[in-house]
Amino acid sequence: MLNNGLTGSHLTRAMLARGDQQVWCAVADYSDEEAMQDLVNNDFTAFIVSAKENSFLCTGGMEWKFAVPIKIIALTATEVSMNHCN
C-alpha cells in the first residue's frame, strides 16, 4: 500500500518499488516544480521504468533527476462542450 502523503518524485519511487513497470511522468533535472511547469508545449514527459539513488531511467534510455507521475486521458465531446457533434 502506498503512503497517501507521497507526492512528486517520491511517489514515483514508491510506485516503482511497489512493482509498477512504467510510470508516465513529467520529468526535469532541477526540481519537481520545474517538471510540472514545463507541461505546456513541450516534450518533457516520459515512461519511467526504474529509479537509481539519485535519478530515474525512462524507456528512451535517458536519465532524469526528477519524475512526477501524471495522468493523461482522452477528452470526450461533452468535456469540451461539443454536445451536438455529428
Image (cartoon, helix red, strand yellow):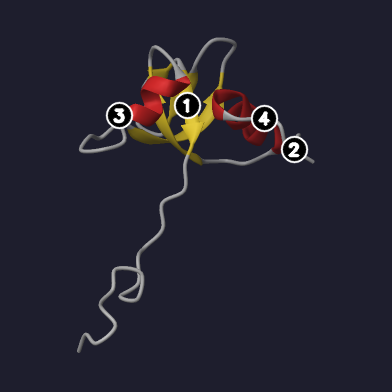
Image x and y of residue 69, in percent:
51, 37
Q: Residue at x 24, y 87 (%)?
A: 84
Q: Secondary structure at mark 3?
A: loop
Q: Nearer the viewer, mark 2 or mark 3?
A: 3
Image x and y of residue 16, in percent:
63, 33
Q: Secondary structure at mark 2?
A: loop
For residue 6, side relative to residue 25 (left or right): right
- The CA distance from mark 2 to mark 3 is 27 Å
Whether tag 4 and tag 1 are in contact, CB under 8 A, the answer is no
For residue 8, side relative to residue 63 (left or right): right
- The CA distance from mark 3 to mark 1 is 12 Å
Amino acid beneath label 4: Leu
Which residue matches tag 2?
Answer: 2
For residue 82, side relative to residue 23 (left or right): left
Amino acid beneath label 1: Ala
Q: Secondary structure at mark 1?
A: strand
The quadrant in which residue 8 appears is top right
Residue situated in front as seen by the camera: 36 or 45? 36
For residue 68, side relative to residue 76 (left or right): right
**Badge 1: few (under 14), some or many (20 or more) residues near its Cα, within 10 Å?**
many
The quadrant in which residue 54 appears is top right
Which residue matches tag 4?
Answer: 6
Q: Which numbered disc covers residue 38?
A: 3
Residue situated in front as seen by the camera: 53 or 61? 53
Q: Nearer the viewer, mark 4 or mark 1?
A: 4
Q: Secondary structure at mark 4?
A: loop
Q: Which of pointers 4 and 1 lies earlier in the amino acid sequence?
A: 4
**Badge 2: few (under 14), some or many (20 or more) residues near its Cα, within 10 Å?**
few
Q: Residue at x 64, y 36 (%)?
A: 15
- The CA distance from mark 3 to mark 4 is 21 Å
